Image (spheres, rainbow, N blue to C red):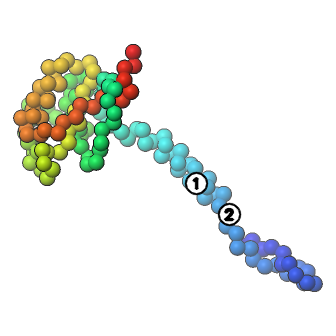
Amino acid sequence: MAIGPMLGGNRRGRRSPMAEINVTPMVDVMLVLLIIFMVTAPLLVAGVKVDLPDSKAGALDQEHKPVQVSLDGQGGLFIDDQPIALDQLPARLAQVAASSREPGGPRIFLRADRALDYGSVMRVMGDINAAGLRRVALVSVEGGNKD
């Protein structure tokens, strides 16, 4: 707390406390935190590196957290960033469908690398459909063609 001169009559030398808060250090800390969050937030989007195809469709509604099924460029299969073998996929999808309380099952976001052939993606889509999961969305890069 700072001490300032007291205004008044003949009383020289008396000082009274000033009730002002210096907010500059707090603003500095908040700006540093803001920069840190702005830099790290894009890194938290997806854990599996997938080169998604382009699309002119808008962004998907993400009311509830979806289950992400990802196929990377080497043919690796992931469910929510956890690697899984292709032969274990139907059993794992049946567990996902059984554990959901939503009608039609939880929303499934299928992310497939653009380098994969159509048959690989359709084989996974067939397993998703066979598990009784009907709410499937194919994820792509928003903004159209980059070419």
Residue at 30% over, 23% down: 53
Sequence-first disc among 2 and 1? 2
Task: Report crowding for label 2: few under 14, some 14 to 19, many 20 or more residues within 10 A (C-alpha).
Answer: few
Rendered position, 14 above or below 121: below
Q: Quadrant of the N terminus?
A: bottom right
Q: How many marks?
A: 2
Decide if residue 27 is on the left or right side of residue 145: right
Image coordinates for residue 18, horizontal then vertical, percent: 74, 73
Decide if residue 63 is on the left or right side of residue 40: left
Residue 130 appears in the figure: yes
- What label does residue 29 carry, if any? 1
Rendered position, 117 above or below 46: above
The local secondary structure at tag 2 comes to loop
The residue nearer to you, when weighing 100 against 47, is 100
Please tell me in which quadrant of the rendered image residue 68 appears.
Answer: top left
Q: Quadrant of the C terminus?
A: top left
Residue 79 appears in the figure: no
Residue at 11% over, 25% down: 123
Do callouts 2 and 1 mark residues in contact (Cβ within 8 Å)? no
- What label does residue 117 carry, if any? none
Which amino acid does the dot numbered 1 rest on?
Answer: Val
Task: Report crowding for label 1: few under 14, some 14 to 19, many 20 or more residues within 10 A (C-alpha).
Answer: few
Residue at 29% over, 33% down: 48
Decide if residue 146 is on the left or right side of residue 36: left
Image coordinates for residue 140, horizontal then vertical, percent: 30, 28
Which residue is disc 2 drawn over? 22
Which amino acid does the dot numbered 2 rest on?
Answer: Asn
The outermost residue toward the top is: 147
Residue at 27% over, 31% down: 139
